[in-house]
Amino acid sequence: MRALFTLTPDESKRLIGRAVARVAEVRQALDTGVLVIAVGSTASQVARACSGQDVDESRFVAGIVARGVLCVTPRSERLPNMVLRRGKVVDLMPLEALELPDEPKVLVKGANAVDPSGMAGVMMAARDGGTVGRLLARFLANGWTVVTPVGYEKLIPSVLESARLLGIDRLERSIGARVGMMPLVGAKVITEREALATVAPVEVTAVAAGGLADSLGAVTFVVEGRKAEVDRALVEVESVKGTRLPAPVVMRCAECHHECDFRGKADDELPSYLVRG
């Protein structure tokens, strides 16, 4: 059987977030170890599914794309990365949690890009690499698992080429924050394709992309498999239809320290698309 459906970015985030909570390594970390969920829009849905708690998605973010530019959520408004020890949310910083003797340890870190090879990449506006810079090397050195939820709305030709082109000091101008990119080598990438495979043994293929109005960034898929399996996958798809995540809290340009053409400018000096209502 073959079926067609479309997911908006918000719907995909919820679908993928629920699926990550079903990934074997994540389940094991929730049972016996430490799970670190780094802030991000898709990761906010992982946090909801793994903790069973409400999460303010407008503040469970750091680097963001909003108002048509690369931007950030102010630290004063940002929720901390979520750390769960044996399934319970604990008040620990991620690096503190990694010192605990629990095994295994799993990091959930979303991405800004994924390419046809399955490589994911995350943009970095902080000169020390931010969360990914501080944590990824530690996870790779120890052989711990990194799970990366990312939707096909972020499909690009090559993450490695993006990493070559980007870099805060490689960019002379930027309409939005200047960034570098870290390829997430060795990460277990979960897209819509892998997400639906946690529900039923089906093949999922992205066949078209784009939309208008509330479907900007939508991706259209074909799912294939036995009728019962396709029906199960479609039940999961329908369960996330209508998902709408709130707009993120955005840094004021006058207060921002990130390299950007608009850094330090007052509202009356900004183009109209950057002035908040």
Image (cartoon, rainbow, N blue to C red):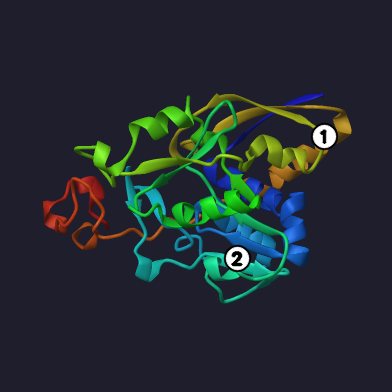
For mark 1, what is the residue? Answer: 201
Q: Which mark is residue 98?
A: 2
| Mark 2 residue element | loop
Q: Which mark is residue 31?
A: none
Q: Inspect the image, locate mark 1, and give the three-letter code of the amino acid beneath it.
A: Pro
146 left or right of 136 in image: right
What residue do we see at 58% from left, 27% from top? 117
- Mark 2 neighbour class, 10 Å CA radius: few under 14, some 14 to 19, many 20 or more: many
Q: 25 or 253, which is in the foreground? A: 25
Q: How many marks?
A: 2
Give the image quarter of residue 233: top right
Residue sticking out furthest to the left: 269
What residue do we see at 56% from left, 74% from top? 92
Q: Inspect the image, locate mark 2, and give the three-letter code of the amino acid beneath it.
A: Leu
Q: Position of residue 98 (x, y in %)?
A: 60, 65
Q: Position of residue 270 (x, y in %)?
A: 16, 50
Q: Quadrant of the N terminus?
A: top right
**Tag 2–tag 1 contact (CB < 8 Å):** no
| Mark 1 residue element | loop
Mark 2 and mark 1: Cα distance apart in space: 34 Å
